[in-house]
C-alpha cells in the first residue's frame, strides 16, 4: 500500500501544481492556503502537510478496506449458492475482522480530519484578521475603488466553508481516483463480452460504465455552471439582509423615537426579496441539476444486472461474482460521478474563493492608499503644507501650516462641509486624499476622540483604559476618574461587563471619552465635537479638568460652539475653497 500512497501523493502534488498554475480558482486557493501549508524550519511548520499526507494515506486505506469487503462478500454469496456452511462461516469471520478494522479507521479519520480543519480555521482566521487590520485596511477599505461588503461574514463564515470544502473536495477526489483504479481492476476481471448489432465488445461492462458516466458528467457541468454565480449572489444578498437587521437592532431607540418601523420594514423586506428572487433561481437550477443526477444514479442501479444477468443464467459467473461485479460497478460509477455530484458544492466553493480573495484584494488596495507622512516627536504638533481634498478632487484645506507646543490648545471652527473631520482624519493618517507632512507624538502618546466615543465589549474599566488593556487602570483610579467626570453613580460598576454603548446616554458616553484621556494621559489629544451632547457648563468643567490634570497635553479640538474659544489658545477657522484663518497668541 505504501507504493500506492507514494504514487498518489506524487500525482496529487502534480495535479495541485497544474491547477494552481493554470486555473483562476487554483491560484485563489494557493493564495489563501499557502500561508498555512508553507513549510518552515521547525517540525510544527511542517505539521499541516504531514497531517494532510496522513489523511491521504487513510483515504487509500479506506479504499483498500472497501475492496476487501467485496471479496469477502463474494465468498459469502458463493458459499450460500453452493450450500457450503464452513466456507460461509469462514468468510463471515473475515468480514467481521474487516468491519472492526473499518470502524477504527473511520473514527481515526474523523478525528484527524476534524483537528486538521480546526487548526486550519484558527490559523487562517488569525492571518485574515491580521491582514484586515494591517495598515488600517478595515477602515481605509471604504476609500477603495470597490469597497467589500460584509467583511465580518467573510472572516467568520467563509473561512469555515473554505477549510471544510477544501478538505472534503481534495480528500474526496483522491478517494474517488484510488477507488476508480482499484475497482476498475475488479470490474475488468469480471466483465465479459457483449454483442451489439453483431459486434462483440470485449470487457463491455468496463467500457460502457466509463462512457456512461463521462457523458453524464459533461452534461451535468453544462447544467450546473450557473450555480457558481447564483451561490455568490446568495451569500451577498443574505449578508446584506443580516447587516440591515443588525443595524436596526443597534439603532432601535432612534427608530422607535422617529416611528420609522414601517420604513425599516420595507427596507428589510426589500433586501429579503432580493434573497428570495435569487433563491428561486437557485431552486429552478437545482431542480434541473439534482433531477439529472438522480436520473443518472437510478439508471445506474439496474444497469449492471441487465448486463451481467445473461452470463449468470448461463452459469458463466456465480452469485458471488455477480454481487462483486455489481459492487465494483457501483464504486466505479460513484468514483467517476464524484466530480458531477460535487459540482453544486464546488460552485459554492468557487463563490467562497471569490469572496475571500476579494477581501484580500481590497485589503491590499487599502494598504496601498497614500497617507500623510507622520514623523514622531516627543510633544506638540507641527503641520507643514497640508492640503486636504474631497474624493472628487475639490480642495477643502490648502497648504495649512501651524505649530502647537506642549500645553497649547487649538480649536477648529468652520461651516458644514469645510473639511473639519477630514482634516482630523488626515492628521490621524487615515484620509487618502491629502498631501503634506505632520509631526506629532504617535502610538499611545496620541489619543483621538470621535463625537461618539467607541465603547468596546467588556467592563467600564475596559472602556476607560481603551486602547490599553483593562489592567492598565486600577479599580481605585477608575472610580476616582469616574467621579471627576461626573459619573459617580457608576463607580460600583467598574468591573461589570455589559453593553455600555446601549446603556449610557450620548452625554455619558462623551464623559467616558474624557475619562479615557485622564486614564491614558496622552501627550496630544484630538477631539472631534466630543462635547456636543454636553451642556456648556459641563463642557467648561471637563476642559478645565483636562488642563489641570494634564497641563502639558496638547489639545486639538473641533467644535461649533463659540464657548470653546475661551478654552483654547489657538483658533483655526476653515473657510470655503480651501482657505483658512489662524489666530495664535503672540509670544
Image: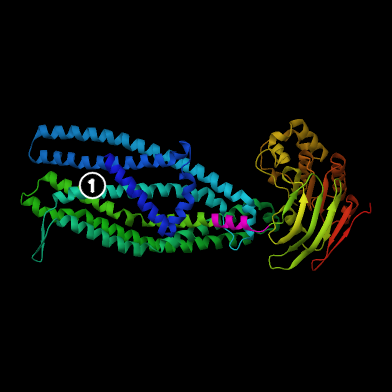
Q: Residue at x 74, y 46 (%)?
A: 442
Q: Is residue 229 visible?
A: yes
Residue at the far left: name it: 314
| Residue 530 locus on image (x, y percent) | 79, 50
Q: Which residue is mark 1?
A: 182
| Residue 149 locus on image (x, y percent) | 57, 57
Examine the rendered structure and indicate whether residue 310 appears above or below residue 81. Answer: below
Specify how the rendered protein is coloured: rainbow
Whether residue 464 appears in magenta in the rendering, the answer is no
Instruction: Work out which quarter of the rendered image holds the N terminus and state it.
Output: top left
Q: Secondary structure at mark 1?
A: helix
**Residue 402, image quadrant:** bottom right
Q: Residue at x 26, y 62 (%)?
A: 215
Residue at the far right: name it: 586
Q: Residue at x 51, y 54 (%)?
A: 356
Is 224 positioned to the left or the right of 582 in the image?
left
Is 20 positioned to the left or the right of 365 in the image?
left
| Residue 544 locus on image (x, y percent) | 88, 44
Residue 39 vs residue 332, the one in the foreground: 39
Q: Residue at x 82, y 66 (%)?
A: 579
Residue numbers of the magenta segment: 360-370
Residue 83 vs residue 40, the one in the foreground: 40
Amino acid at each position: 500500500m505504501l507504493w500506492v500512497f507514494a504514487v498518489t501523493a506524487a500525482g496529487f502534488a502534480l495535479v495541485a501544481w497544474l491547477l494552481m498554475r493554470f486555473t483562476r480558482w487554483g491560484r485563489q486557493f494557493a493564495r489563501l492556503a499557502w500561508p498555512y501549508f508553507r513549510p518552515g524550519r521547525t517540525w510544527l511548520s511542517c505539521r499541516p502537510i504531514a497531517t494532510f499526507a496522513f489523511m491521504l494515506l487513510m483515504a487509500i486505506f479506506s479504499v483498500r478496506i472497501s475492496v476487501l469487503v467485496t471479496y469477502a462478500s463474494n465468498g459469502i454469496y458463493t458459499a450460500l449458492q453452493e450450500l457450503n456452511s464452513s466456507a460461509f462461516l469462514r468468510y463471515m469471520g473475515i468480514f467481521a475482522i474487516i468491519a472492526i478494522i473499518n470502524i477504527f479507521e473511520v473514527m481515526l479519520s474523523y478525528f484527524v480530519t476534524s483537528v486538521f480543519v480546526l487548526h486550519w480555521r484558527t490559523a487562517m482566521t488569525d492571518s485574515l484578521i491580521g491582514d484586515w487590520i494591517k495598515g488600517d485596511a478595515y477602515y481605509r477599505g471604504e476609500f477603495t475603488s470597490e469597497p467589500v461588503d460584509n467583511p465580518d461574514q467573510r472572516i467568520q463564515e467563509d473561512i469555515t466553508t473554505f477549510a471544510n470544502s477544501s478538505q472534503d473536495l481534495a480528500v474526496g477526489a483522491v478517494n474517488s481516483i484510488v477507488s476508480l483504479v482499484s475497482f476498475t481492476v475488479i470490474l475488468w476481471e469480471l466483465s465479459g463480452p457483449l454483442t451489439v448489432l453483431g459486434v462483440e465488445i470485449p470487457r463491455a461492462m468496463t467500457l460502457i460504465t466509463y462512457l456512461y458516466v463521462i457523458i453524464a458528467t459533461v452534461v451535468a457541468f453544462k447544467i450546473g455552471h450557473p450555480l457558481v454565480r447564483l451561490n455568490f449572489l446568495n451569500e451577498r444578498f443574505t449578508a446584506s439582509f443580516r447587516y440591515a437587521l443588525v443595524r436596526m437592532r443597534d439603532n432601535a431607540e432612534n427608530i422607535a423615537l422617529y416611528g420609522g418601523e414601517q420604513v425599516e420594514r420595507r427596507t428589510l423586506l426589500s433586501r429579503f426579496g432580493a434573497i428570495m428572487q435569487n433563491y428561486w433561481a437557485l431552486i429552478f437550477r437545482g431542480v434541473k441539476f439534482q433531477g439529472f443526477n438522480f436520473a443518472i444514479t437510478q439508471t445506474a442501479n439496474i444497469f449492471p444486472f441487465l448486463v451481467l444477468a445473461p452470463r449468470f443464467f448461463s452459469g458463466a459467473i456465480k452469485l458471488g461474482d455477480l454481487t462483486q461485479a455489481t459492487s465494483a460497478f457501483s464504486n466505479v460509477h460513484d468514483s467517476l460521478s464524484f466530480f458531477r455530484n460535487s459540482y453544486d458544492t464546488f460552485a459554492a466553493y468557487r463563490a467562497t474563493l471569490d469572496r475571500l480573495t476579494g477581501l484580500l484584494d481590497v485589503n491590499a488596495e487599502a494598504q496601498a492608499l497614500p497617507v500623510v507622512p507622520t514623523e514622531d516627536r516627543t510633544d506638540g504638533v507641527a503641520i507643514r503644507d497640508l492640503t486636504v481634498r474631497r474624493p472628487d478632487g475639490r480642495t477643502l484645506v490648502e497648504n495649512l501650516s501651524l505649530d502647537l507646543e506642549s500645553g497649547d490648545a487649538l480649536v477648529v471652527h468652520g461651516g458644514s462641509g469645510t473639511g473639519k473631520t477630514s482634516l482630523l482624519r488626515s492628521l490621524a493618517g487615515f484620509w487618502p486624499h491629502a498631501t503634506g507632512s505632520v509631526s506629532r507624538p504617535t502610538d499611545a502618546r496620541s489619543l483621538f476622540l470621535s463625537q461618539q466615543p467607541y465603547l468596546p465589549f467588556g467592563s467600564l474599566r475596559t472602556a476607560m483604559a481603551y486602547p490599553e488593556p483593562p489592567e492598565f487602570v486600577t479599580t481605585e483610579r477608575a472610580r476616582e476618574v469616574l467621579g471627576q467626570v461626573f459619573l459617580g453613580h457608576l463607580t460600583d460598576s467598574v468591573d461589570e461587563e455589559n453593553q455600555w454603548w446601549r446603556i449610557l446616554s450620548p452625554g455619558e458616553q462623551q464623559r467616558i471619552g474624557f475619562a479615557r484621556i485622564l486614564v491614558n494621559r496622552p501627550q496630544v489629544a484630538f477631539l472631534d465635537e466630543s462635547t456636543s451632547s454636553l451642556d456648556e457648563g459641563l463642557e467648561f468643567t471637563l476642559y478645565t479638568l483636562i488642563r489641570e490634570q494634564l497641563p502639558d497635553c496638547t489639545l486639538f479640538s473641533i467644535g461649533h460652539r463659540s464657548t470653546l474659544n475661551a478654552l483654547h489658545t489657538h483658533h483655526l477657522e476653515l473657510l470655503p475653497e480651501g482657505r483658512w484663518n489662524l489666530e495664535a497668541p503672540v509670544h
